[in-house]
Structures are given as structure tokens and as C-alpha cells.
Amino acid sequence: MDDALTLGGVFMVVAVFMLIFATAPAVRKWRRTTAATPIKIGTGLRSGQQRVAIEGRAEKLQALLTSPMQKADCLAYQYKVEERQRNRRRTNWATIQETAAAVPFRVDDTTGRIQVHPGDTPLLDLSQRRTRDITRGDSSNGPLRIGQTRHRHTESRLDPDDFCCVVGQATSTADGFMIKPVSQDDPVIIADIPYRRLRRKMLRMAILITLISLVLGGFGIALLLEHFGLVDTPFEP
């Protein structure tokens, strides 16, 4: 089979995969975030339901979670295990396990307090990372048995009294309002950076992933056109 056809097909498959499973989710996440209205808790909602963004201090509401790595009490965590992998050209860290969880908590922004119910699948964007390298012969940390391979455990947490930003659908209650997911397609977003920075971060990520998808797709189309003799390209597979 012609190399141009093979490479063109590979580039197109990767581009389509990224568009479906990376670009589209990143754009949806950015759009959900920018669609929110930043408000003070004491101001309340303009209607019975409203998509809002609030900032304040996270507080314990019910039980706390225990984080996998540090064994610390927290309100939410992200945890992943990466494995050091080598090939002929380079070495890199590949994620082999990833998990996240959150429990209901309160947010206090000095004008009022409300409850946040993250649901089963919240979107966590926690930047306060704690990392531990697990080397050969050390299998006491984390849920995996390490054996002879080098692994890296990374944990990000939202602890009680941490600053947080919450974006989601707010519903009026007898004493104010609460934030909770209205469907699996519209999860609550929880971050530990200000709302303005969160919007910029998500926009940059959506643009970057979109550009990568388009570049890969462009290479694929160019190679396929060359294979069928429709254009001449400088590529030499």
C-alpha cells in the first residue's frame, strides 16, 4: 500500500478521534463556563433557575473524603498514576489510572452561604498538585503494586477552607439557592482558581486542541490528495 495513503489515513483517523473525544468536550466545557453569570451569594438569583459562577471559601457540609495518596480529609480530589515509558526516541509519562470524587459542601463568599451538590460526575479543575515519585521496590503508596517499574502519583485536592470557584445550575430554595447538576450532560464545575482565570484557561485549552485536530486533519487531507494525484506536496513519507 502507498505510504501517502497509509499516513494520510492515520492522520485522518487521529484527527477525527481528537475532534470527537477531545475537541468537542473541551469546547463544551468552555461554553458551559462562559455561559454562567458571576454573582454574589447574598444577591440571590434573578429567576428560579440560573446558571451561575460563585467564588468563596469551601466549607465542610457533611462527611469528608479521604484522598488516596496523602490520606488527607478533603472535599474533592483528583488522583492519577503515571508510568514511565521508554521507546527508541524518547521517554514519557503515560497515565495508567485516574479517578476523581467530590462530596457536598458549602461555599461562603462573605455575603452568604450556599450548598453545592457535585453529583456523581463533577468536572474538577484543581491546580494545587501534590506529586510523589514511586521508585523500584516501593509498593506501599497508592492502590497499585509498583513492582519494577517507575511510577508517579499525582493528587490535587480541595480542602476545607480552600478558595474555590463553582460553576453550575443554581435552583432557588427556601433560604436562598443551591447548585447541583440538572443532568449528566451538564455537570457542576469545581475549580480552585478565580472564575476569570478559569474561563481563560478553558478557552486556551479549547483553541489548542482544536488547532492540533485541524493540523492533523490538514496533513491527512494533503497526503490523501497527493496519493490520488490531485495535488503535489513536499511530503516524502
Image (tube, helix red, strand yellow):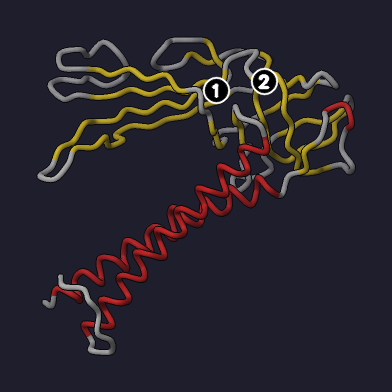
Residue 205 x %, y %: 50, 48
Residue 192 x %, y %: 60, 27
Indicate left or right for 162 with 72 as reference: right
Question: Few, some or many C-alpha atoms within 10 Å of disc 1 (few <14, some 14-19, many ≥20)?
Answer: many
> Which comes before the other along the chain, label 2 or label 1?
1
| Rendered position, 191 above or below 36 | above
Residue at 73% over, 33% down: 179
Judging by the rendered image, the residue that carries numbered circle 2 is 105
Amino acid at dot 2: Phe
Tell me, yes or no, whether the two marked residues, 2 and 1, touch with CB atoms within 8 Å: yes
Judging by the rendered image, the residue that carries numbered circle 1 is 76
Residue 185 x %, y %: 60, 48
| Rendered position, 116 above or below 51 | above
Between 45 and 34, which is closer to the camera in this rendering? 34
Label 1: element kind: strand
Amino acid at dot 1: Ala
Indicate left or right for 61 with 143 as reference: right
Residue at 55% over, 23% down: 76
Label 2: element kind: strand
